[in-house]
């Protein structure tokens, strides 16, 4: 067993916090929520995390998610006002210098590709959009993909290649790739297995496995079989190789697969944060995971958990209770 | 798979907060007495019943939602698909054919004159599907419709010609208004013939984009006016039922617009729109081998009642969506700058569905035109316009990728073939047709004189042009929570 030790609680008094996102260098944390603002938290000289910057006036409604670009120079925010804002620091301070319009209604999620050249957004309008960043810091829409049949909850890029994954209220996960001959991103795989809304997904460090969490109270691990399944039978495909059932009593809203430690953290509607660890020596085609800790982290739904990309074991969480908390996972 | 263009597939239907809210059109209930206690409604399998205070039960009327209601609402659009099925379907078409046959037999009342107008894109789609030459395909289709009960089958090229000539002149008017009078918001002129694009612009971008859209009617609606106004008049004001054969479902929405309803005749300029994919279904259901049918002829009722010709399909220069960009470019180069352009060289931008062409003189760009097909390119165009970064004078905008030859209701590729391959085949077939210039059409000149009273007459702007309406977004009380 291990445990989550509270490092610091960041109070905001700004209502429900929907999402927190680490700067790629791990030195700053951005948060967003129903007060329509973005807060950036950094460490002061004494090592305490403090709120340095509050970005306002970008959105007219709740900000559902924020994402740092791989360079750390840009911050994208997805809002229920149907727009996505891109903030940059060209003039010293963060300013919103581009607004991506086009979704019909609430934008639920935004993500940058590993190269920083593509941006993906998804919405209650059931569509996933891929935008390309051009030379003049403009964002051109390269694809509008209507493959989900319901509200799309989350978009996540592959850790190193031009692949994209999304999950939806239609209980499925879809995988997309850039198809240069079509000048478009296309859906190449649909992962079915969850029996209710899939709220979030997270790739492992290699991009060959994907973890998903759902309203059906399970976590599923999916694996890519590049030569078909069973291996050697046809083209690439993805299979569910593990289901973590019986651990969660309520909807699981978010999942984060740590790229340095391999730990999986979940954010649950029962106010708890759980951490899972793959058992040593488990079969790669049927792996087993053990829950190494469960911590009642918040007073209300936990909306988001995310591992720091540079500091192994440092986890950030946020909740409907308005708190952002930083945790250290200890064995 | 939806038969609407991509632009109309984004909907506002579902959310985890408000499951499947389908339509919010309020129902009007005629109340006999005013009750102080409110009324009780009982739900049974066969309907909803209102229980009156005296205990009597009254069945509540089911709400009928018309296509016009759908178009006037800022909400979903795909729920319009089910409405279309009843109002603009093959079943409705067959019902009208049957009823008209019966009236003819009975001889009790005046039968309608049924006219079917064929547009080029579905003809080519069906020609490939049934391995016929384009002209053979038209002949067989003419025969098929006559067997069903059509009185006349006509070619819509005449309406394409009108649309091209009118947009050419409209462009010059807009260009001059900008250059000499400094009028804002008239350039770039944006194409008006794609109802998917027009509907999207009305619902989503409203007053911002609408002034840029050409007022010239689409070929389908010009055909509607020609048939219901000129031809109708020439045939002694016979009651006409007008069917068009089109490449997408969006055309059904267009035909249903209030702007194209005549109070006078209490009918629409186009009564029913049928698409290539529906024709394929009709033929297969009737067990008809299209190639085995006799060759039918096409009528030209705008020339004379008896005029009948064998089909001789033509293409226009430029795209298979009507060739607007090419025609307007050449015309404007000539009219405005005295330049003759033989062939236009387009440069692909981000993808082959966004192309631009420029006219340069002494290093100065005189004209900058583009063709933007498909929803993503519409997005990029609209955003450019909003940010004031559009340098275009004209953009041919079509909601379907690859334009109208790849319309949402064209015949699907056979098992094992890709849409892309099929589109290439349709495009090749289109480019194999002999080229035709609308300026050379004698009959068009005559119609301008005889029907419209000249090219700049009031009747001309009344009959060949239309207007657009901003549709205000209705905020949905259920999702303003955050």
Image (cartoon, rainbow, N blue to C red):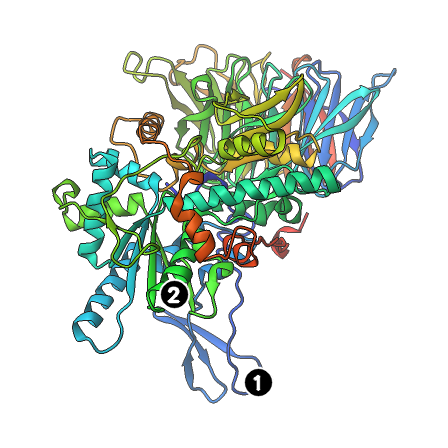
User: Is residue B149 shown to the viewer in this render?
Assistant: yes
* Percent of width and height locating residue B6: 46, 39
Q: Nearer the viewer, residue B322 or B91?
A: B322
Outermost residue toward the right? A45
Disc 1 residue crowd, few under 14, some 14–19, many 20+, Cα 10 Å: few
Q: Which mark is residue B35?
A: 1
Q: Which mark is residue B43?
A: none
Which quadrant holds the N terminus of chain B? top left
Q: Nearer the viewer, residue B443 or A300?
A: B443
Q: Residue at x 60, y 36 (%)?
A: A108
Sequence order check, earlier mark of 1 and 2: 1
Examine the image and state in which quarter residue B440 appears.
Answer: top left
* Percent of width and height locating residue A256: 58, 24
Q: Secondary structure at mark 1?
A: loop
Q: Which residue is mark 2?
A: B233
Q: Is residue A181 left or right of residue B275?
A: right
**Do the residues at discs 1 and 2 belong to one chain?**
yes
Examine the image and state in which quarter residue A297 appears.
Answer: top right
From mark 1 to mark 2, how far is it between C-alphas?
Answer: 54 Å
- Please say if the residues under marks 1 and 2 sit with CB atoms less than 8 Å apart: no
Write down the chain letter for disc 1. Answer: B
Disc 2 residue crowd, few under 14, some 14–19, many 20+, Cα 10 Å: few
Q: Nearer the viewer, residue A113 or A23?
A: A113
Q: Is residue A306 left or right of residue A221?
A: right
Q: Residue at x 51, y 80 (%)?
A: B30
Write down the chain letter for disc 2. Answer: B
């Amino acid at each position: 067993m291990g445990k989550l030790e509270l490092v610091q609680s960041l109070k905001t008094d700004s209502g429900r916090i929907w999402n927190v996102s680490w700067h790629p260098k791990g030195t700053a944390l951005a948060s967003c929520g129903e007060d329509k603002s973005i807060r950036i938290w950094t460490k002061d000289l004494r090592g305490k995390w403090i709120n340095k910057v509050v970005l306002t006036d970008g959105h007219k409604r709740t900000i559902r998610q924020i994402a740092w670009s791989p360079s750390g120079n840009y911050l994208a925010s997805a809002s229920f006002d149907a727009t996505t804002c891109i903030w940059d620091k060209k003039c010293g301070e963060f300013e919103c210098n581009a607004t991506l319009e086009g979704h019909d209604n609430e934008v639920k999620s935004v993500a940058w590709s590993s190269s920083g050249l593509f941006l993906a957004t998804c919405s209650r309008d059931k569509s996933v959009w891929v935008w390309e960043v051009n030379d003049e810091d403009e964002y051109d829409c390269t694809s509008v993909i209507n493959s989900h049949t319901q509200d799309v909850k989350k978009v996540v890029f592959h850790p190193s290649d031009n692949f994209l994954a999304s999950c939806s209220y239609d209980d499925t996960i879809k995988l997309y790739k850039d198809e240069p001959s079509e000048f478009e991103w296309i859906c190449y795989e649909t992962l079915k297995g969850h029996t209710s809304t899939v709220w979030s997904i997270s790739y492992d460090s290699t991009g060959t496995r994907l973890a998903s969490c759902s309203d059906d109270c399970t976590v599923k691990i999916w694996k890519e079989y590049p030569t078909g399944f069973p291996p050697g039978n046809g083209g690439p495909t993805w299979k569910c190789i593990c289901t973590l059932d019986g651990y969660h009593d309520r909807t699981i809203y978010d999942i984060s697969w740590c790229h340095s430690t391999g730990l999986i953290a979940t954010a649950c509607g029962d106010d708890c944060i759980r951490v899972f660890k793959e058992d040593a020596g488990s079969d790669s085609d049927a792996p087993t995971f053990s829950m190494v800790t469960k911590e009642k982290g918040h007073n209300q739904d936990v909306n988001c958990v995310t591992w720091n990309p540079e500091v192994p074991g440092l986890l950030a969480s946020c909740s409907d209770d308005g708190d952002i908390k930083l945790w250290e996972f200890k064995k | 798979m939806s038969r609407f263009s991509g632009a109309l597939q984004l909907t506002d239907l579902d959310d985890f907060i408000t499951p499947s809210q389908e339509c919010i059109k309020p129902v009007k209930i005629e109340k006999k007495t005013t009750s102080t206690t409110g009324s009780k409604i009982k739900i049974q399998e066969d309907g909803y019943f209102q229980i009156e205070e005296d205990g009597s039960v009254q069945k509540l009327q089911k709400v009928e939602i018309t296509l016009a209601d759908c178009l006037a609402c800022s909400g979903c659009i795909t729920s319009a698909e089910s409405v279309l099925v009843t109002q603009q379907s093959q079943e409705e078409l067959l019902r009208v054919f049957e009823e008209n046959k019966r009236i003819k037999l009975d001889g009790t009342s005046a039968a309608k004159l049924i006219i079917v107008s064929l547009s080029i894109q579905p003809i080519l789609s069906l020609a490939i599907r049934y391995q016929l030459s384009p002209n053979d395909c038209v002949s067989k289709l003419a025969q098929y419709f006559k067997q069903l009960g059509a009185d006349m089958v006509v070619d819509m090229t005449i309406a394409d010609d009108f649309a091209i000539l009118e947009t050419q002149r409209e462009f010059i008017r807009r260009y001059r208004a900008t250059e000499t009078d400094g009028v804002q918001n008239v350039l770039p002129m944006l194409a008006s013939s794609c109802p998917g694009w027009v509907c999207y612009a009305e619902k989503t971008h409203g007053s911002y984009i609408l002034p840029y859209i050409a007022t010239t009617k689409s070929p389908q609606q010009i055909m509607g006016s020609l048939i219901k106004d000129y031809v109708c008049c020439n045939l002694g004001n016979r009651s006409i039922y007008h069917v068009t054969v089109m490449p997408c479902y969006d055309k059904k929405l267009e035909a249903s617009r209030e702007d194209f309803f005549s109070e006078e005749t209490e009918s629409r300029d186009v009564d029913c729109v049928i698409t290539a994919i529906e024709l394929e279904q009709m033929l297969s259901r009737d067990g008809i081998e299209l190639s085995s049918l006799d060759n039918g002829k096409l009528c030209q009722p705008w020339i004379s009642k008896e005029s009948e010709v064998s089909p001789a399909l033509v293409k226009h220069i430029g795209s298979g969506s009507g060739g607007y960009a090419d025609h307007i470019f050449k015309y404007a180069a000539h009219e405005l700058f005295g330049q003759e352009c033989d062939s236009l060289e387009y440069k692909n931008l981000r993808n082959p569905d966004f192309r631009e062409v420029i006219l340069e003189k002494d290093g100065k760009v005189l004209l900058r035109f583009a063709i933007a097909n498909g929803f993503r390119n519409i997005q990029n165009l609209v955003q450019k316009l909003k940010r004031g970064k559009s340098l275009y004078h004209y953009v041919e905008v079509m909601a379907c990728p690859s334009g109208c030859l790849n319309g949402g209701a064209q015949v699907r590729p056979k098992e094992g073939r890709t849409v892309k391959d099929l589109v290439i085949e349709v495009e090749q077939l289109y480019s194999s047709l002999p080229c035709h210039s609308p300026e050379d059409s004698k009959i068009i000149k005559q119609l301008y004189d005889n029907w419209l009273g000249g090219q700049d007459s009031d009747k001309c702007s009344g009959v060949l042009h239309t207007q657009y309406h901003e549709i205000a977004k209705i905020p949905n009380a259920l999702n303003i929570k955050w």
